[in-house]
Amino acid sequence: MKYHSWGASGTLNDFAEATMGTGSEYKFSAMQYDVYGIVNLPLSTLPMVTPYVKLGGGYYAPSTKLSTPSGDNSTSTSDFGIVGGFGFEVNTHSSMKLGLGANYHRVKNSETDFMSFSARILFPI
């Protein structure tokens, strides 16, 4: 399960203020439940670095919130979506790994495609 949250562009928030009043703004979020496969692409020239690609699908629940001086208005949907991404992991000299990744999410019947980025530390338990 993942939670994503992001603000609207300045242009959209300027429109919200012009039409709904000073201080009006849009905010977006999405809950995500997904399953994906990862293919590691080892590099013989850099054995400590392992790039990867991933592809999968899941259930998304994006929502939009409009805050105005006269109150808040929220809408949400839920639908199937796909995720595709890439990144890399760096093997340290211990059992720990460091990683960076980027993912593109496309939700069916929704206008809320989005990108997510991650930085992580992986270690065995």
Image: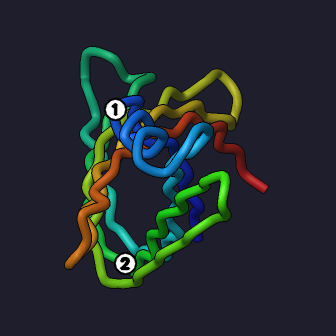
Badge 1 density bin: few <14, some 14–19, many ≥20, Cα 10 Å = few
Q: In the rendering, at what x and y percent does residue 108 appear? A: 22, 76
Identify which residue is drawn at 30% across, 74% down. Answer: 57
State the residue lying farthest toward the right: 125
* Dot placed on the residue nearer the N-terminal end, 1 or 2: 1
Position of residue 97 relative to residue 37, above or below, is above
The colour scheme used to paint the residues is rainbow
State the residue lying farthest toward the left: 109
What amino acid is labelled 1 in the image?
Thr
4 or 120, nearer to the observer: 4
**Residues under numbered marks 1 and 2 in contact, where contact means CB atoms less than 8 Å apart:** no
* Circle 1: element type: helix
83 or 61, nearer to the observer: 61
The quarter holding residue 68 reads bottom right
State the residue lying farthest toward the top: 45
- The number of numbered discs placed on residues in the rendered structure image is 2
Mark drawn on residue 57:
none
Mark drawn on residue 58:
2
38 or 47, nearer to the observer: 38
